[in-house]
Structure formats: C-alpha cells, structure tokens
Image (cartoon, grey):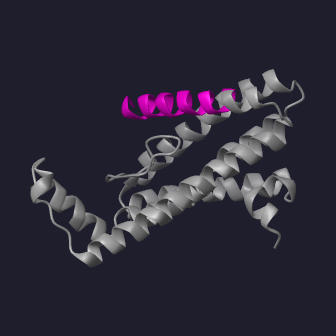
C-alpha cells in the first residue's frame, strides 16, 4: 500500500466505494458512540457522554451535512466543476478516524484522571499523579492527537482533490470554513 493512498484515498478508490465505506463507517461510528458512551458533538469533537444509537447517528449526520454544505459552497466558489459526490465522500470519509478515537475516550486511566481533577475542585496545586498515569495520559494524548491530525489531513487532501485548488488563499478560506463548521455543528447538536 502506498502511503499517499493512506493519506489521500480519494486518488485511488472510486466514488461509489468511498461512499459505501463512508456510510458504513458512519453507522459503525454511531454504534461506537452508543457502546463506548461518547458523543460526536462537533466536526472534530469527541467527548464522553451517554447516547442512544439514534442520537449518535443524528450527531454524525449533522456533522456530515454541515461540513458537506460548507465545503460544497466553498468548492463551487473555487471550481464550478466541483462534483457533489466528491464533496460528500470527503465529508464522510474524514470522520472515520474520529469514530476510532471514540474507543480511546473512556479508557479507565483517563476516567481515573478525570475523577482526580474533579475531586481537586480547581485546586490543581494539590493534584498528584502516579508516574504510570502520566505515561498513559501522554501516550493516549499522543494517539488522540495523531488521530485528529489524520482526520484533518484526510479532509484537506480530499477537498483539494475534489476542487483542484492550489492557492494559499484557498487554504485560509478552507480553515475559516472549518472553524465556522465546528461552531455551527456544535450549536445545532446542542439545540436538538
């Protein structure tokens, strides 16, 4: 497997394959949200919370639709020939790493650390961690950061492939659209 296909599967696989994998992943991610007690309450957000399958599926659908609509608008501005199916595939494929991160959110060591922080009642000077806890926190944090970076890389490469953009101004517009999308998706999800 070539690494560029790992970071940009949109170059290798057909739109039909990507769509099927993306939709199946969204369903699997919703099951993960239910059984791992996580919420996907933003384009890049994964938090601990109890959700039913339908609540999790609704959150994932909102996230996909928000990023899809915003990127489609930007894509059409950049290149009028941008195809809807390509933007839809980008919108569902980039979320696969985020679904995987759901398995790491409620790891027992993180739960214990969160309980210690909560028990400190804001007095962080008295907060003490065991060396093993610090190692595990660092390792899990590194894994979660890599997963987030991979999701952003998939989103960026997919959008760049779909629109064929090259100018630095489009990268700035892309980043602004993602920030707006994160705020918008969180607002919608928290109000439904």
Is residue 184 rendered magenta in the image? yes
Q: Position of residue 36 (x, y in %)?
A: 39, 63
Residue at the image point whose x is 81% and y is 52% from the top: 10
Q: Position of residue 11 (x, y in %)?
A: 86, 54
Relative to 118, 63 lies left or right = right
Relative to 191, 30 lies left or right = right
Quarter of the figure with residue 103: bottom left
From what the image shows, is residue 167 above or below residue 36?
A: above
Q: Position of residue 119 (x, y in %)?
A: 10, 56
Query: Magenta residues, as a range?
Result: 173-192
Q: Please tell me which residue lies in front, 32 or 177.
A: 177
Q: Residue furthest right?
A: 81
Residue at the image point whose x is 79% and y is 21% from the top: 77
Q: Residue furthest top?
A: 77
Q: Quadrant of the N terminus?
A: bottom right
Q: Please tell me which residue lies in front, 177 or 53.
A: 177
From what the image shows, is residue 191 above or below residue 2?
A: above
From what the image shows, is residue 190 above or below residue 34?
A: above
Residue at the image point whose x is 44% and y is 34% from the top: 186
Counting labels gives 0
Residue at the image point whose x is 68% and y is 54% from the top: 22
């Amino acid at each position: 497997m070539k690494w560029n296909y790992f970071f940009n599967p949109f170059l290798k696989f057909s739109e039909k394959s990507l769509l099927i994998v993306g939709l199946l992943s969204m369903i699997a991610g919703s099951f993960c949200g239910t059984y791992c007690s996580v919420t996907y309450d933003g384009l890049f957000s994964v938090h601990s919370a109890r959700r039913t399958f339908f609540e999790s599926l609704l959150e994932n659908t909102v996230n996909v639709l928000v990023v899809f609509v915003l990127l489609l608008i930007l894509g059409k501005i950049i290149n009028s020939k941008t195809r809807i199916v390509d933007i839809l595939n980008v919108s569902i494929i980039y979320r696969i790493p985020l679904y995987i991160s759901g398995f790491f959110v409620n790891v027992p060591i993180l739960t214990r650390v969160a309980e210690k922080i909560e028990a400190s009642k804001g007095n962080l000077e008295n907060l003490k961690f065991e060396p093993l806890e610090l190692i595990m926190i660092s390792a899990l944090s590194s894994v979660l950061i890599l997963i987030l970076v991979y999701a952003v890389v998939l989103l960026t490469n997919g959008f760049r492939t779909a629109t064929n953009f090259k100018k630095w101004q489009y990268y700035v517009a892309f980043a602004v659209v993602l920030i707006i999308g994160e705020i918008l998706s969180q607002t919608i999800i928290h109000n439904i």
